[in-house]
Amino acid sequence: MSETKVFGMTPTWRRDVHTHYCPGCTHGVAHRLVCEAIDELGIRDEAIGIAPVGCAVLIHQYMDLDFIEAAHGRAPAVAYGIKAVRPDKIVFTYQGDGDLASIGMGEIVHAVNRAWPLTVVFINNAIYGMTGGQMAPTTLLGQKATTCLSGRTAEANGYPVRMCELLATLEGPAYIERVALSKPQHILKAKAAIKKAFENQVNNKGFSFIEVLSTCPTNWGLRPVEACQWLEENMIPYYPLGVFKDFE
Amino acid sequence: MAKGRVEVREEFCKSCGLCVAACPKKVLRISDSINPRGYRPAEQFQDGCIACGICARTCPDVVLTVYRIDE
Amino acid sequence: MAKVLMKGTEAIAEAAIQAGCRYFYGYPITPQNEIPEHMSTRLPQIGGVYLQSESEVASINMLMGGAATGYRVMTTSSSPGISLMAEGMSYLAMGELPCVIVNISRAGPGLGGILPAQGDYFQATRNAGHGDYRILVLAPDTLQEAVDLVQDAFDLSQKYRTPVMLLADGFMGQMMEAVEIQERTIEEPKANAEWALGWRKERGGKRAVIYNLKLAPNDLEQRVGELQKKYEVIRQNEQRCERYRVDDAELVAVAYGTTSRMVRTAVDQLREEGLKVGMLRPISLWPYPVKHFSLPSSVRALLDVEMSSEFQMLEDVKLATECRLPVATCARWGGNAPSVSEIENKCRDLLNSSR
C-alpha cells in the first residue's frame, strides 16, 4: 500500500509562518490561490508583488516572492513604475476594498484604462478590516459598520461600488471577473480566474482584474462558517459572480 | 471510490471550522486538543476520506495535506 | 558634448538622460512641462520609457516602483504637484529608494501663480511628508550648475539610497543659457541587484522585499535609527556652498538659486563703490551648509535675500550662525524677485546704520 499526495502546500507559500489573519478569514485562501497560480505557471523567479495597506499589508510574509509595500491605494501606480522598467517581470497587486475602491479609486481606474499587461487581485469583504470594521465603499446598504452603526444608508453614504462593472466600461482591460471564496465550488472558479489573470500577463495579453468576494468574520461579527453563508446570501446578490470582460 | 487521509499541521490551525463544513464525507471535526497558539486544531476522526482535497482547498491557513491511498 | 544654448527645463531633462536616467514618470504642470515633453520624445529613442501618470500622486508612486528595480528614475513637477508627492517621498525615504525629484517651483500658496518663487523651501528642507526622514536638496543658480547638480543628484541618490531633490524655480526652468552636458558612467542597475526587485535569479533564488511597515516599536526604532545614521553621514559629507567675496566683507548677503544671481550683481556693483559686501550661496539646502558659515570677524551683519514672504531660509541662516550676527531681510514674492537696486539699497542702508 502506498500513498500519493493529492493536495499539499505549494512551494511559493512560505512554510512555518503563521498568518496574522483572524480565524476563518478568506484572505488566506486568496493568498494560497495566488501562490498556486504562480507555481503552476512556473513564474516564481519573475513575479513581483505589491502589498497594499490594510489587512494584506503583510502578504509578503506568506509568499516567497519579491515584494514592495505601497502606500494606501497606490499599488497600481507602483506596479506601472516597475513594469515600465521591467516588462519582462510578472507584476501584480493584491488590494482590499478600502485600498482599491476608496483611496485608490483614481489609481486603479487609470491603471486599468492604460491596459498594460498587469494583474490585480482585489479582495472585496465589504468593510475596512485592519482599522476595525469601518464602512467601506463596498459596504452593503443596511450593513452595520463602526462608522454606520445603524447600517449604511444611500442617503448618507451613497451606494456600494461595483468595481468589476465600473471597470468593464473601459476599453482597456483584457479580463475582468468576479469570484467568491465562500464555498468550495466558488474557490475552484476563483483559482481558475486568478491563474488566468497571471497567464494573461505571461502571454502579454493586457490588464487582468479579479474581484474576490471574501469574508471578514471578525468585523462582520459572525463565525467563519456563518460568514461564508452571509456572503452567499448578501454579497453575491449585489455583486454577481461572473466574467465581465474577456478578450478571447 | 478512492480512499484517502488528511494530515493536519496542528500548530498552524486556527480552528475556523471551514474544512469541517466543506468535507463532503464529514470525516473532519474540531479536536479537543489545544495547539501552542490556543486553538483547537481540526482532525480527521473517522474513515471515509475520498481524497477529494476540498478541505485543503477551503483552508485559509494551508494546514491540510491530503493523500490518496493507493491499494 | 559641446556647449549649446538650451532652455533650463530641457537642459535638466537632457542632463538626466546623460546621467543614465531611462525611466521618467510625469504629469503636466507649469512651469516644468518641457521636461516631460523632452522625456516623452527622447526616452523612446534610446530604449527608455516615458510614462505619463494621472496625477502627481501616481507619479511619485510610479517613481517608487521604478526606483525599487534599481534603475535610475526621475519625476519632475512644480510646487502644487510636489505637495501631492509628499506622501510618496516619506515612503521612498523609508524604503531607501534612490530617485531624483525636480521641483521647478512657482508662487503659492494654493494655486498661487505660475511665476517663480522660493516659497517651497520649508516643503523641500523640512520634509513634505510625515515622519523622521530627510531628503537631499540641491539648488542651482545657473543652468550649467543645474545640469551638473541634476547629474550629481542621481549619483548621490544611489550612493546614499535616498531621494534627492533639485529645487529650481521657474526662472531657472524657463531661461536659456549655454550649457555643456557630460555623459556619466554608471554602475546601476547591476550594483543594486543585491536589494532591488526583479533580480531573484541573480541573487541565487533569494527574494527581495522593500519594507515600509515596522509594527514593533523596537524594530521601527532600529530602522529609523539606521536612517538617522545615514542622514548624519550626509550632514557631514554633503554640505555645499559658494562663498563669494566674503573674506573681507562687512556685510554678507545669503541667497540661493535665482535670487543669488541678483545678489551677485549687487555685490559686484557695491564693491565698485567700495562697499565691502559678500555673498554666501547655499547649494545644498539640506543638509544646510553650516560648515561654510564660519565668517571673518569683519562681518557685522547678514542679509537674507529670498523670494519668500515668510523668509523661509531665515531660520537656517540664524541657526548656521548661532544667532551671533543680526540678520536683515530683503524679499519679494508672488512671482516677483528682489531687484538688484532693491538689494543694493538695502545693503547701503545696513552698512550705514551699522557704522
Image (spheres, coloured by chain):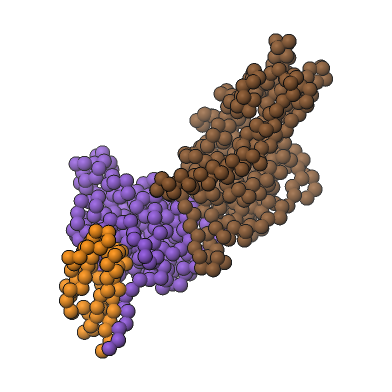
Chain colours: A purple, B orange, C brown
The picture places residue A159, in percent across and down from the top left corner, at 27, 46
Instruction: Name the residue: 49% across, 39% down.
Output: C132
B19 vs A208, left or right, is: left
Give the quarter of the image for residue C102: top right
A248 vs C79, left or right, is: left
Q: Is residue C32 visible?
A: no
Locate the C terminus of chain A by quadrant.
bottom left
Instruction: Name the residue: 68% across, 45% down.
Output: C152
Give the quarter of the image for residue A85: bottom right
Q: Nearer the viewer, residue B31 or A196?
A: B31
**C152 relative to A79, above or below:** above
**A62 relative to C336, above or below:** below
The picture places residue B37, in percent across and down from the top left corner, at 27, 59
Q: Is residue A217 visible?
A: yes
The picture places residue C170, in percent across and down from the top left corner, at 63, 34
A216 vs C44, left or right, is: left
Q: Nearer the viewer, residue C188 or C66?
A: C188
C29 vs A138, left or right, is: right
Instruction: Name the residue: 35% across, 48% down.
Output: A98
The picture places residue C285, in percent across and down from the top left corner, at 62, 35
Instruction: Name the residue: 47% across, 69% down.
Output: A43
